[in-house]
Image (cartoon, grey):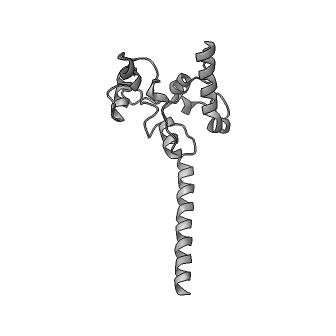
Amino acid sequence: MAKAVVRAGLVAVGLAWALIAQVALAAEMKTYVVAGSQAATLDSCVEPTDIMRRKHMEFIQHQRDKTVHGGIRSSKHSLSGCVDCHVRDEPDGEAVPIHQKQEFCGACHAFTAVNLNCFDCHAAVPKGPGAALASKAAYQAVGLEQSPRAVSDGKEH
């Protein structure tokens, strides 16, 4: 009987710790926007936040299909639009690649344990000064010399 009471007490303490950790994590990831990015200065994304959290991949895939199959290039749900808005800059002006674990896409995908392979081919920083260096540094951070796409066709992208 005493063992059962101790076991129940340990289970209760474990559940309490799990609940506290979950609440703390939820509070920490409340905004899902990285300070220093353009998105941090805006009231909302291209869609309401709750919709973007649930359907961003559908928007990106739909935009991909319109662009690749129909040649229609708009920016409302484009991946480059996400990158332009959600990437933050270091104090020296260098863009921080969006898919690194502490950044916007990387942090959420790491939290949800979802593979983030968009940036195997797509730029993880906005185009502009320093973009090539930041992109190369991001690939090196994950153990690659250059993007897999560049390796496959022998061209630097």
x, y percentage for residue 140? 33, 31
Quarter holding residue 150: top left
Is 110 placed above or below 147 here? below
The answer to whether residue 86 is left or right of residue 137 is right
Residue 20 visible in this rendered orientation of the protein: yes
Is 14 placed above or below 80 here? below
At horizontal 57% and vertical 61% (from top left) the residue drawn is 19
At horizontal 39% and vertical 26% (from top left) the residue drawn is 148
Residue 74 visible in this rendered orientation of the protein: no
How many numbered circles does the render carry?
Answer: 0
Task: Say which quadrant the C terminus sits in.
Answer: top left
At horizontal 37% and vertical 26% (from top left) the residue drawn is 134
The answer to whether residue 7 is left or right of residue 142 is right
The residue closer to the viewer here, 114 or 80, is: 114
x, y percentage for residue 25? 53, 52
Quarter holding residue 147: top left
Is 8 placed above or below 153 here? below
x, y percentage for residue 10? 52, 74
Quarter holding residue 97: top left
Q: Residue furthest top?
A: 71
At horizontal 49% and vertical 35% (from top left) the residue drawn is 116
The answer to whether residue 157 is left or right of residue 11 is left
The residue closer to the viewer here, 118 or 51, is: 118
Q: Residue furthest bottom?
A: 1
Task: Say which quadrant the N terminus sits in.
Answer: bottom right
x, y percentage for residue 44? 64, 32
The residue closer to the viewer here, 128 or 78, is: 78
